[in-house]
């Protein structure tokens, strides 16, 4: 499904990703964990072709057996491949001034002809699909509201609905619960798990807290400073094991850091209390 | 045969181009010629002349300087001339000073030039620049830029008011402008004293495109030459509002004195130009002199 | 992790010296430019005071305004308005693609650089010069004025529009790109909704300016109140000039108020 | 309290009818204004195409540009620059108090209404008209141009400045008011820091426009490259005109690039 | 110290405050509780003279025996009185683009002559006081940083330092912990309690959670729909008692609402977990 080979990405001063090799099979649900700055978002952005790896590094990403990028260049049919990959971004990436429905219909851009989309003449079948997707995430009632008037949790669910409307075979979710309270987090993770189960969609979800990974994903890939430091069953991730591979950063992965709110990142509020252990 | 005529009207040194004053005249013209007259008013002649060059304007009202450009660039031909209401054949250029100034004549001005500030006219103005630079300066073999304490240049209105306000000591102006000032601001006019008057400058010409159909030309000419002469009260009133008596026939020769001045100006410039070679200079001067002689012969 | 609850006494931490140096240099440069320009601009502040009497007399001539021909003025102001409407409208239509094409974050450099330079040229050349050019092809009259305003305003708006585009939030655009959208779709759904309020606000602002600029076009015969205004000034009819200026002020103010309302609707 | 985890199926919730009606009316009004203006603006699009050959001929006269007197042009451009520097500088100085006084959220209505009207008047009247008036009182030359730009630009900037002030966040200002600060202190510490980047950006933008406007002031003899430009146009020296325009374009572009850099520093 | 008589404030559609009568004595520390929209902020704003009550309603507020407002009109010396009242706002109300130090020095505007403040020539003694205040809240190290670069908790502490620098006799704190995580909340409340204790300052603090009121304030005033529904010792506030006077809204006051984050108030994040019971 997703094949990542020798992926290396160098930023100005630092290595964002360092020789990543990984394969995700069809129908898997994989968690991507790692502390802040470990490269989770960077990896996601490479998989969906929004970022290119270092040129001539031999790095390559295949999605659904079609090449997305190779050697730091996007493949010709990257746009086509992208239509098969749904992405839920850390900051939702909705268009604030458009209605929730229009945002969700963006998921159909890959298959609706440009003239239809541009003149806002989406086919009725697609509109119905959009509404159904919204209904699945419990947001049908807000379909005609502006995206900017929604709370964080609601925006996250609209982003999921957009990915659903895209009828993607692969879903990449980048810290979908980072800015949500525990209850909303549970709802969002349940929806992802449900999609995975019912629609047989391959899901890769990056998370900050190991508890959620253990609860929802059979397999976990752990990153540290751009390198894969663990790839295996989530159940093996005991605190002591994590401490071994992570050192002092473990603490952050397990208990939400109190001083997160104190970091100089206004507008980003990551303090989650310990997640509710019981699922819905 | 034409159905429509585009008639360009610019403000000249001698007349204003207010739509309201012109409207009755233009409607009479429409009635008499059966042509639809589209009037266009502009403050600057460049647009109208370029329009005439590309046949966007067929007939136009010009000042002398602009008529010259129209004839040279835009296939224009002078066919009539206005006559001021007082019956004079034209207007005059003046040098003006403040009423309280001790200066009373051109000699006074030239003698005291080193302590005076001079308000020259717009370089494109006939009466404000061309005429004085010939008759006042070139004839006396002096350069205004050198003899005066300082020189600024502006349009007639500004110059008149600057003299009245004692911002400049001497300035150029013309009789039409002073007459208008006398109507609108007699108090300001009262502060101004004329110390020099030029020879007559011919009054504004009417120009048409040479390639206008003869029939149309005939209609237009017929209308203009008879307007105000048939004893109709209304026509006389219309002309009076424009400040005119009935029109007079004219042709390109009207421009000869102006051309003379223009060429003379050019000659002075070439003479003083240090950038061109001596050889080229003599050649250009010879060309100019030949033209000047040709004009002299015609006059 | 460390809760900073302890009481630190640290009387004067190093103030950023570099930033205050930069500031000082900046001010020094500004002062130098001002001083250098003093001579060139021929600044004579004393004259202003000395001759303020003149100005008062001149201003006195303007009052009371003479509205006797207000119908003519009004007609011409309406033509001016029409001229500005079409000039602005056409410019907005053109400024949208040109604005997008001259945005660094949308177009590649080999597109945005030439487009920007063309827009710079449109902006740098005065409306009146353009009016002259158009007079020869469409003849005298308001239409030439419309075209002149069009070209000049396109240059101005394209720049303002592209500045708005360059300031957008890239995240929604990436969200749309990730669905496999084409570039046109990215622009229409990701960029335009974000910049629309600003664009509308700029367009209305330019419309007001164009009503004012249109008064100059009269100089080359491109119609509007400008011709009348110039004639009045030329002929020393200051009372009439004053009346015209008052009418212009009233209409520009009215347009201003209306467009302010409109702007608030969109932003 | 209710976690909306339930799956609602609600196929088409009532779309906001009112807002689409408002939109429709808005468009209808725009269309009506455009249609009404069509006649007044004397729109003849076909003429543009038919006689575009004329334009090409005329444009042809402009090339090749004649740079033989470039030294003179350059000198005059520098004077124009000086003129714009001082005109803008004085305007910025005045626009700060006037801008603050014409902000709804700072001044009471009996102050901001009259101040706004005065600023409207300054803005509504063209620079050239002001230049005419100042020429009479301080004499010809660049200084009259400086004064004209000053008055007009003050009107424009005061408006832009007050728009920025009206958009500020009121909370920091209340924070300062609550400490018992005077109104002046509220403005200096609460308002100005918030609007400063925008003000600087507007001032630089206006400076660029003023360099362009200064070229028009030449029409009435208020100094700078404009005087030369008009002389050339009136004399039909199009090759020289073209050279001047190219120099203007280059210098405006250069100023543009520099001020863009500066703007980025502040915003 | 603070005397509120017959205070009524009518907004366009609703009564914001409804005949409030209350007196706070010198040296008290009073909590103001009530659900969202009950009028806590409105009352605070009236006390510090940023809002005026209905005209001719007979409403009056005295602070330190001097009239702040009466009958809907600010008293002439309101500005003088304000210098005695320090306010900590719900949204901090710092000036983002000024340095932390300058923000703190704003507290001295009431006593420093305008010419000094405007030309940024604050007396050295005041500068020293500002630095001391910053040190008391543990922010001396950030004195020359821009206020906008601070996290929420740090901004809150700067706001407290400003109030300290003001040397006010009364301190009004409007939901000072609403947007903070539990650890930061504890720190901020401890600082307030310490100031109250050491500087003998009268403190009125509005809170969303009754637990904090009980822990830190001997006396509590409870508002509901703009009316005082309780005024007495905090210890009497048992859940059952609150239910009695509040009805169904009690729940919100006790357990942080999960759906707060889902309310349509982006940028305002109110989910606090149960506060840590142990103080520092
Ligand atoms: N465009 C970029 N330019 C330079 N450095 C970058 C860029 N994007 C990411 N980085 C760096 O790459 C590293 C990985 O960042 P990334 O966003 O992938 O981390 P993350 O694991 O998603 O962290 P978080 O949990 O905070 O979202 C960081 O050190 C970051 O600063
Ligand atoms: N300026 C205003 N105009 C109209 N209504 C207002 C205004 N300010 C407050 N209100 C209304 O007054 C009521 C009380 O508001 P207030 O801000 O005092 O509540 P609060 O108790 O502080 O709530 P929260 O806990 O959410 O801060 C609310 O219903 C609010 O909508
Ligand atoms: Mg990330
Ligand atoms: Mg509140």
Image (spheres, coloured by chain):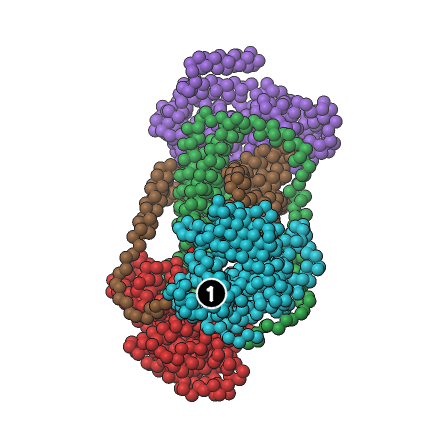
Chain colours: A cyan, B purple, C brown, D green, E red
- Relative to B224, D140 lies left or right: left
Q: Which of the image's four quarters has the C terminus of chain A?
A: bottom right
**Residue at 32%, 46% in the rendered image:** C25
Residue B36 location, quadrant: top right
Coordinates of residue D55 in the picture (x, y in percent)? 61, 31
Q: The numbered mark 1 sits on a residue in which chain?
A: A
Which residue occupies 42% across, 45% down? D261
Q: Is mark 1 on a helix, strand or loop?
A: loop
User: In percent of the image, x 43 and y 61: which residue is there?
Assistant: A36
- As drawn, E48 above or below A41: below
**Left or right, residue E143 beside residue B27:** left
Image: D21 above or below A68: below
- Asked if one can make out residue D97 in the rendered structure from this viewpoint, the answer is yes
- Identify whether E36 is placed above or below C172: below
| Residue at point 39%, 50% (across, down) | A13
- Quarter of image, res D15: bottom right
What residue would you read off at disc 1? A208
Q: How many numbered badges does the structure rendering display?
A: 1
Instruction: Name the one closer to the observer, B9 or E264.
Output: E264
> CB of residue at label 1: within 8 Å of ligand 1?
yes
Q: In this view, does D264 lie to the left or right of D11?
A: left
Front one among B265 and A1: A1
Asked whether B181 or A241 is in front, the reply is A241
Circle 1 residues within 10 Å: few <14, some 14–19, many ≥20: many
Quadrant in the rendering for residue E31: bottom left
Do we see residue B173 in this rendering?
A: no
Residue C197 in the image: state x and y as whole percent. Answer: 56, 55
């Amino acid at each position: 499904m997703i094949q990542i080979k020798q992926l290396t990405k160098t930023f100005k001063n630092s290595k964002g990703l360092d020789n990543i090799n990984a394969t995700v099979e069809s129908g898997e649900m994989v968690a991507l964990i790692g502390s802040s700055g470990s490269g989770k978002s960077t990896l996601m952005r490479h998989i969906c072709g929004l970022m290119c790896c270092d040129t001539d590094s031999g790095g390559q990403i295949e999605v659904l057996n079609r090449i997305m990028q190779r050697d730091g260049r996007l493949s010709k049919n990257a746009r086509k491949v992208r239509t098969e990959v749904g992405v839920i971004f850390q900051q939702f990436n909705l268009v604030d001034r458009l209605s929730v429905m229009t945002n969700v219909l963006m998921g159909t851009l890959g298959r609706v002809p440009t003239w239809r989309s541009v003149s806002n003449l989406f086919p009725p079948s697609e509109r119905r699909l959009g509404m159904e997707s919204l209904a699945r995430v419990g947001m049908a009632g807000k379909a005609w509201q502006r995206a900017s008037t929604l709370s964080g949790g609601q925006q996250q669910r609209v982003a999921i609905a957009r990915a659903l409307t895209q009828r993607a075979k692969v879903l990449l979710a980048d810290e979908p619960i980072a800015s949500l309270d525990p209850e909303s987090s549970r709802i969002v993770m349940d929806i992802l798990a449900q999609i995975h189960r019912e629609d047989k969609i391959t899901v890769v979800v990056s998370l900050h807290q190991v508890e959620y990974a253990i609860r929802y994903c059979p397999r976990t890939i752990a990153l540290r400073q751009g390198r894969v430091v663990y790839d295996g069953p989530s159940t093996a991730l005991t605190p002591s094991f994590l401490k071994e591979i992570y050192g002092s950063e473990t603490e952050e992965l397990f208990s939400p850091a109190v001083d997160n709110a104190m970091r100089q990142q206004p507008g980003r509020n990551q303090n989650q209390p310990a997640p509710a252990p019981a699922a819905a | 045969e034409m159905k429509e005529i585009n008639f360009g009207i610019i403000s000249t040194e001698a007349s204003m181009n207010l739509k309201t004053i012109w409207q009755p005249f233009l409607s009479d013209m429409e009635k008499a010629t059966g042509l639809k007259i589209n009037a266009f008013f502009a403050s600057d002649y460049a647009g109208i002349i370029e329009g005439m060059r590309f046949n966007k304007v067929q007939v136009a009202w010009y000042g002398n300087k602009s008529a010259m450009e129209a004839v040279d660039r835009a296939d224009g031909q002078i066919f009539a001339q206005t006559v001021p209401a007082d019956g004079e054949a034209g207007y005059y250029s003046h040098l003006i000073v403040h009423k309280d100034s001790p200066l009373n004549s051109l000699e006074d001005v030239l003698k005291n030039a080193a302590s005076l500030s001079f308000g020259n006219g717009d370089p494109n103005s006939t009466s404000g620049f061309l005429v004085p630079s010939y008759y006042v300066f070139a004839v006396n073999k002096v350069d205004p830029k050198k003899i005066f304490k300082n020189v600024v240049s502006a349009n007639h209105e500004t110059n008149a008011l600057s003299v009245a306000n004692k911002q400049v000591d001497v300035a150029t102006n013309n009789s039409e402008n002073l007459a208008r000032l006398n109507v609108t601001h007699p108090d300001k006019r009262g502060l101004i004293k004329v110390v020099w008057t030029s020879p007559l400058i011919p009054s504004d010409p009417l120009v048409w495109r040479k390639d206008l159909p003869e029939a149309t030309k005939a209609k237009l000419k017929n209308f203009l030459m008879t307007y105000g002469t048939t004893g109709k009260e209304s026509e006389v009133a219309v002309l009076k509002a424009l400040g005119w008596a009935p029109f007079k026939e004219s042709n390109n020769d009207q421009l000869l004195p102006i051309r003379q001045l223009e060429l003379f100006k050019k000659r002075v410039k070439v003479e003083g130009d240090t950038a061109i070679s001596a050889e080229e200079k003599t050649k250009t001067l010879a060309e100019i002199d030949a033209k000047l002689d040709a004009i002299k012969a015609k006059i | 992790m460390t809760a900073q609850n302890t009481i630190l006494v640290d009387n004067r931490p190093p103030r950023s010296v570099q930033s205050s140096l930069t500031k000082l240099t900046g001010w020094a440069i500004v002062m130098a430019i001002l001083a250098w320009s003093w001579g060139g601009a021929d600044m004579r502040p004393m004259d202003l005071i000395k001759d303020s009497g003149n100005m008062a007399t001149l201003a006195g001539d303007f009052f009371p305004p003479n509205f006797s021909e207000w119908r003519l003025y009004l007609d011409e102001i309406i033509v001016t308005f029409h001229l500005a409407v079409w000039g602005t409208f056409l410019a907005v239509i053109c400024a949208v693609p040109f604005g997008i094409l001259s945005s660094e974050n949308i177009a590649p450099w080999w597109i945005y650089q030439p487009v920007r330079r063309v827009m710079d040229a449109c902006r740098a050349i005065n409306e009146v010069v353009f009016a002259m050019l158009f007079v020869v092809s469409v003849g005298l009259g308001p239409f030439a004025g419309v075209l002149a305003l069009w070209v000049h305003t396109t240059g101005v708006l394209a720049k303002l529009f592209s500045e708005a585009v360059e300031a957008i939030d890239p995240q929604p655009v990436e969200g749309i790109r990730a669905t496999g959208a084409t570039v046109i779709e990215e622009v229409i759904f990701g960029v335009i909704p974000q910049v629309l309020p600003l664009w509308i606000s700029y367009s209305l602002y330019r419309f007001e300016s164009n009503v004012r600029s249109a008064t100059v076009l009269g100089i080359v015969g491109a119609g509007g109140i400008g011709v009348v205004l110039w004639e009045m000034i030329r002929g020393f009819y200051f009372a009439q000039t004053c009346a015209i200026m008052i009418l212009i002020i009233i209409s520009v103010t009215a347009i201003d108020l209306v467009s302010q309302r409109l702007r608030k609707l969109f932003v």
